[in-house]
């Protein structure tokens, strides 16, 4: 629990000698303070590599170094309070090393980044928004190693019960200014299968909150029937850096590595990826210009960095980590997922850096890619080289200018009308005058 305290100043009674001593020490302290100030100012203005140190409570690494560029550019139009929940909601899950690095780990990355963000405030009474850090994606199945999220709803419900019991902020807004991360296949519906996700819908206690989620489509869907900000899946930035091969020729024309069922299983009339991946395999795995592999390979990102086009077909959900990996490694993403919404369209030039192929046209992929290669491929690749596209899709700690958490903060600033505190400020100012 976070302990909220307000310190009070006391006026001690001093003797005459104590007052004299106090005056002397005060003058000495004042002189030393001015000297330290001008010395520090000189260092900061003459050495741009020196940053500012922010000390926060409730942070395991209490000294957070923030670059001058970040101080100048991180949006700070509002204040955000991060609940310090008991470890069973977050920290305990980190004992599994996979928790902070898999494709759903944006819930961890955002939490860590916000702890040292300039928008964070330590007094919840000054906050416009409240972040609830619950890690629901770190319960890995012992059968297939994938995150099992059946526990997500009760775990989140327990967190909401705890903060509403200890603090007044959830109840006063009905949760409208509270933020959660749902980085799973179907977002806040917390299920991997669409028909079950749609049947269960979003938990009632979350329907009034702000959800940061990877799932998004351009048509009406119960799993996005909530105030939401679309975020990218998590890709470790260091893994991208390790996979970049500078100056190497892209010798793979079209690439895909991942799950592809030759004979897809029928789940009550539903097939994995709507059988799109099956068709890609059958049509192109022997094609001389396509490099299609079904087996897992730890170094597959190095293959992306060698490729011209990277296929990003839907799986159970429309989104895929390949979207981020392709952009980050300079491979043109070929998006095959009808109606998908893409993250941060005001920051990422999706029309200029990617291709969209309708699911029904997947059999024509060869001709489509050949035509692009012969016409406007160089333009698309030049657009891809703009670092802002890559930066907006990667999460860093601490936040970097224009990165994924920066984009989340920027989008939250547009939702200040949901803040209980912000909505009351105009009335308070009116009453004060």
Image (cartoon, rainbow, N blue to C red):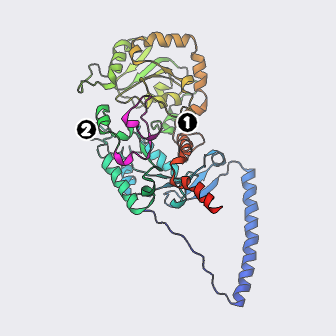
Task: Specify the quadrant of the image occupied by residue 11.
Answer: bottom right
Q: Position of residue 215 (x, y in %)?
A: 41, 34
Image spot of residue 203 (x, y percent) = 34, 45
Q: Which residue is mark 2?
A: 143
Q: Which residue is mark 1?
A: 392
Q: Is residue 311 above or below residue 109?
A: above
- Residue at the image position 48 percent from the left and 25 percent from the top: 304
Quadrant in which the N terminus is drawn: bottom left
Up/down of 433 relative to 192, above or below: below
Q: Does the magenta run of residues contain 220?
A: yes
- Residue 8 seen in the current view: yes
Q: Is residue 423 left or right of residue 193?
A: right
> What is the distance, in whole Å, between disc 2 and disc 1 at their CAs?
34 Å
Residue 206 or residue 33, whichever sits in front: 206
- Asked whether residue 250 is drawn in magenta, I would say no
Q: Quadrant of residue 287?
A: top left
Residue range of the region highlighted in magenta in the rendering: 203-231
SS category of the residue bearing label 2: loop
Q: Earlier in the sequence, mark 2 or mark 1?
A: 2
**Residue 306 to residue 148: above or below:** above
């Amino acid at each position: 629990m976070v302990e909220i305290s307000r310190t009070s100043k006391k006026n001690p009674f001093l003797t005459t000698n104590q007052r004299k001593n106090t005056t002397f020490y005060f003058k000495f302290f004042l002189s030393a303070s001015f000297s330290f100030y001008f010395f520090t100012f000189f260092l900061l203005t003459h050495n741009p590599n020196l940053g500012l140190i922010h000390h926060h409570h409730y942070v395991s690494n209490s000294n957070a170094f923030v670059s001058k560029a970040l101080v100048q550019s991180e949006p700070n139009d509002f204040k955000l309070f991060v609940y310090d929940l008991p470890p069973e909601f977050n920290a305990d899950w980190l004992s599994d090393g996979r928790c902070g690095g898999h494709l759903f780990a944006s819930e961890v990355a955002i939490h860590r980044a916000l702890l040292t963000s300039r928008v964070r405030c330590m007094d919840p009474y000054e906050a416009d928004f409240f972040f609830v850090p619950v890690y629901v994606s770190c319960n890995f199945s012992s059968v297939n190693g994938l995150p099992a999220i059946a526990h997500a709803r009760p775990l989140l419900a327990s967190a909401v019960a705890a903060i509403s019991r200890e603090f007044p902020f959830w109840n006063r807004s009905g949760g409208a200014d509270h933020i959660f991360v749902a980085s799973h296949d179907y977002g806040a519906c917390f299920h991997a299968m669409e028909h079950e996700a749609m049947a269960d819908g979003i938990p009632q206690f979350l329907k009034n909150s702000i959800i940061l989620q990877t799932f998004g489509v351009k048509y009406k869907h119960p799993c996005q029937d909530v105030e939401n900000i679309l975020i990218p899946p998590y890709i470790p930035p260091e893994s991208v850096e390790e996979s970049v091969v500078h100056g190497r020729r892209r010798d793979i024309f079209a690439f895909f590595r991942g799950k592809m069922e030759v004979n897809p299983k029928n789940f009550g009339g539903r097939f994995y990826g709507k059988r799109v991946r099956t068709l890609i395999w059958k049509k192109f795995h022997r094609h001389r210009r396509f490099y299609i592999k079904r087996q897992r390979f730890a170094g597959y990102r190095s293959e992306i960095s060698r490729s011209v086009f990277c296929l990003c077909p839907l799986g159970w959900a429309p989104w895929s980590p390949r979207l981020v990996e392709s952009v980050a490694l300079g491979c043109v993403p070929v998006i095959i997922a009808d109606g998908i919404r893409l993250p941060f369209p005001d920051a990422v030039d999706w029309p200029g850096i990617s291709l969209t192929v309708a699911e029904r046209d997947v059999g024509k992929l060869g001709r489509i890619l050949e035509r692009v290669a012969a016409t406007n491929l160089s333009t698309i690749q030049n657009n891809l080289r703009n670092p802002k596209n890559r930066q907006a899709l990667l999460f860093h700690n601490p936040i970097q200018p224009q990165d994924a958490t920066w984009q989340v903060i920027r989008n939250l600033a547009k939702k200040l009308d949901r803040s209980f505190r912000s909505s009351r400020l105009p009335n308070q100012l009116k009453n004060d005058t």
